[in-house]
């Protein structure tokens, strides 16, 4: 099996994107894995600090590694949105394949210094682990939004700048860059998210020189996804859409099976709903 780094390089070359989907439980993991397997596509499972606190950092790493070994399947795990070196260390020591150090809210120089410290520790501990960092602020919550999160970069002047991206990558040594290109965390229920700045993605691709990750995938228009992937995005993160699908699946289960009390029977509906949403996104990201 290829390494995660090789799958990402391959996606970049073929102008497709690997789907990164977050989980909070086993039902989410099952839905995502089933969708990926049916399409035979590599997949990344993400857990933020809060999601890891609930599932257990080691549990999550072991579950994903077991699936990879048992099925000989390219499923990988990322410590999403991690805010301290200590939490990065916990994930790397538990066996995660990739980590996202998120200091995107800090001033530029401070972000560089802290990210560099993380990269140095990871590279001397488990050099195969990929380190991603965020440059620019996208809001923090994978939730249904009523307004654009305060401070999120959705105007041209606030987006990640190519010259900053270049310096950031060179000075920190990161493997993957998550830029602010009009994307925000969370989604509006009845309206699409703001437009992406495709030209900026193309400029950043050249300046950064490392594969780029698009966060805040929920609610983005299909045509924006396609253009973003054509212009340099190699991984797309989706969380809110999965959470919404899980909830709608559970609501359906509760209303259609009012007397059912067996969790694994009720959870069949959220699993199915998550699977459907993931399959839809994976097809789009891979031109299927
Ligand atoms: O890291 C997670 C993603 O960026 C999720 O964003 O909830 O807007 O899909 P989303
Ligand atoms: Zn994110």
Image (cartoon, grey):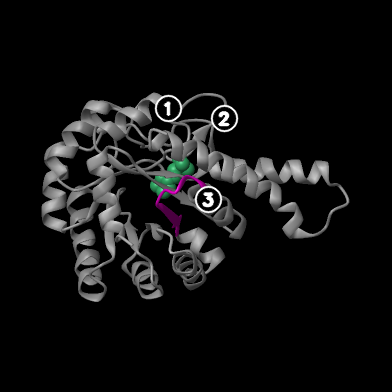
In the rendered structure, which disc, 3 or 1, sits on the residue that comes first in sequence?
3
Taking the spot 38% from the left edge, 24% from the top edge, the residue there is 223
The vertical placement of 212 against 115, above or below, is above
**Mark pair 3, 1: CA separation:** 20 Å
In the image: residue 254, left or right of residue 270:
right
Taking the spot 33% from the left edge, 60% from the top edge, the residue there is 99
Residue at which label 1 appears: 222
Residue at which label 3 appears: 32
Magenta-tinted stretch: 38-48
Residue at which label 2 appears: 189
**Mark pair 2, 3: CA separation:** 22 Å
Taking the spot 29% from the left edge, 61% from the top edge, the residue there is 3
Q: Quadrant of residue 284?
A: top left
Element type at mark 3: helix
Q: Quadrant of the C terminus?
A: top left
Element type at mark 2: loop
211 is within the stretch colored magenta:
no
Q: Quadrant of residue 95?
A: bottom left
In the rendered structure, which disc, 2 or 3, sits on the residue that comes first in sequence?
3
2 vs 1, front mark: 1
């Amino acid at each position: 099996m290829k390494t995660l780094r090789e799958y990402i390089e391959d996606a970049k070359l073929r102008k497709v994107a690997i789907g990164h989907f977050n989980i909070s439980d086993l039902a989410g993991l099952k839905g995502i894995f089933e969708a990926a397997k049916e399409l035979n596509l590599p997949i990344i499972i993400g857990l933020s600090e809060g999601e890891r606190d609930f599932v257990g950092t080691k549990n999550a790493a072991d579950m994903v590694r077991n699936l990879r070994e048992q099925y000989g399947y390219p499923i990988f795990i990322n410590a999403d949105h991690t805010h301290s070196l200590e939490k990065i260390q916990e994930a790397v020591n538990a066996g995660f394949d990739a980590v996202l150090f998120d200091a995107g809210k800090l001033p530029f120089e401070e972000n560089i210094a802290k990210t560099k410290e993380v990269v140095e520790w990871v590279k001397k501990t488990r050099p195969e682990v990929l380190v991603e960092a965020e440059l620019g602020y996208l809001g923090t919550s994978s939730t249904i939004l009523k307004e654009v999160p305060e401070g999120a970069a959705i105007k041209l002047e606030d987006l990640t700048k190519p010259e900053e991206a270049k310096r950031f990558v060179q000075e920190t040594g990161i493997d993957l860059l998550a830029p602010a290109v009009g994307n925000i965390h969370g989604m509006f229920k009845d309206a699409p998210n703001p437009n992406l700045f495709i030209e900026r993605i193309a400029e950043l691709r050249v300046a950064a020189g490392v594969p780029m990750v698009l966060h805040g995938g929920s609610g983005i228009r299909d045509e924006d996804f396609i253009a973003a992937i054509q212009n340099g995005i190699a991984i797309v993160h989706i969380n809110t859409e999965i959470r919404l699908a899980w909830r709608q699946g559970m609501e359906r289960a509760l209303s259609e099976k009012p007397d059912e009390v067996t969790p694994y029977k009720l959870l069949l509906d959220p699993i199915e709903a998550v699977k459907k949403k993931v399959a839809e996104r994976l097809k789009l990201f891979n031109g299927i």
